[in-house]
Amino acid sequence: MNKIITIGREYGAGGHSIGRQVAENLGIPFYDRDIVYETAKASGFEPELIESEGEDISKTDSILKSICAVSSIYYHDTQEAIHDVQKAIILRLAQAGPCVILGRCADVILRKAGVECLNVFVHADDVHRAVRVSEITGINNATELQKLMVKKDSSRHNYYSHYTRKKWGDSRNYHMTLDSGMLGYDLCIKIITEAAQTVE
């Protein structure tokens, strides 16, 4: 294997931290917000806009875009443009050499392009995720934390479904799915690192 790894993740499950450490262990680049900056340079859109639109789609938007596509009505908005640019950048980064890419449908984009990679999905129970999200956001109210996790996960699910026609988080779409709440970050990092080093 050429050590290209994609990591999908539930909000608060630690996918970013795990992916970054895996990349460090393997001595390869880690791409997350770098893709945002590259997209901004290539498209002219502001990084803040790309950050908010680049991996986020509401259920209503998803339905609207599907209806427009089926009825052959031309429908091309900012998010579609951002996705197209990000897709090209993900392919370019993968072609440049081994790396870890976080989210953004990279697993399906690379698979369709015939690029071999190790596809991982990281998830965790609500309690572990809520603790992590509280650390990230400073929110301490349990109800608010739950609403935020549901909103973020729903957006990622709808985005992935819209652009890949596959179910986000479905184990059949990945080579491995890891419960970071039960396993802990360190063991998840070890498992992914060793898999990347041994799988041919």
Image (cartoon, helix red, strand yellow):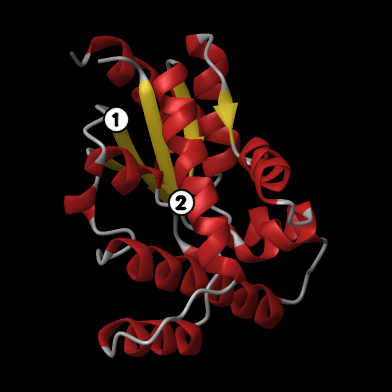
- Residue 127 found in image quarter: bottom right
Residue at the limit of the structure toward the right, as seen here: 138
Report, in whole angstroms, how far the alpha carbon at label 1 lies from the one at label 2: 14 Å
Q: Residues within 10 Å of mark 2 (few under 14, many from 20)?
A: many
The amino acid type found where label 1 is placed reads Leu
Inspect this view and state whether residue 11 appears.
Answer: no
In-front residue for pair 192/8:
8
Badge 2 marks a residue whose secondary structure is: strand
Instruction: Look at mark 1 in the image and give the residue it sits on.
Output: 118
Task: Using residue 86 as the reference point, say whether residue 136 is left or right of it.
Answer: right
Instruction: Look at mark 2 in the image and give the residue it sits on.
Output: 9
Relative to 66, is 11 above or below? Answer: above
Residue at (60%, 39%) from the top-left corner? 32
Inspect this view and state whether residue 2 appears.
Answer: yes
Relative to 150, is 55 above or below? Answer: above
Q: Earlier in the sequence, mark 1 or mark 2?
A: 2
In-front residue for pair 30/193:
30
Residue at (59%, 59%) from the top-left corner? 54
Task: Using residue 14 as the reference point, say whether residue 94 is left or right of it.
Answer: left
Badge 1 marks a residue whose secondary structure is: strand
Q: Position of residue 90 (x, y in %)?
A: 47, 37
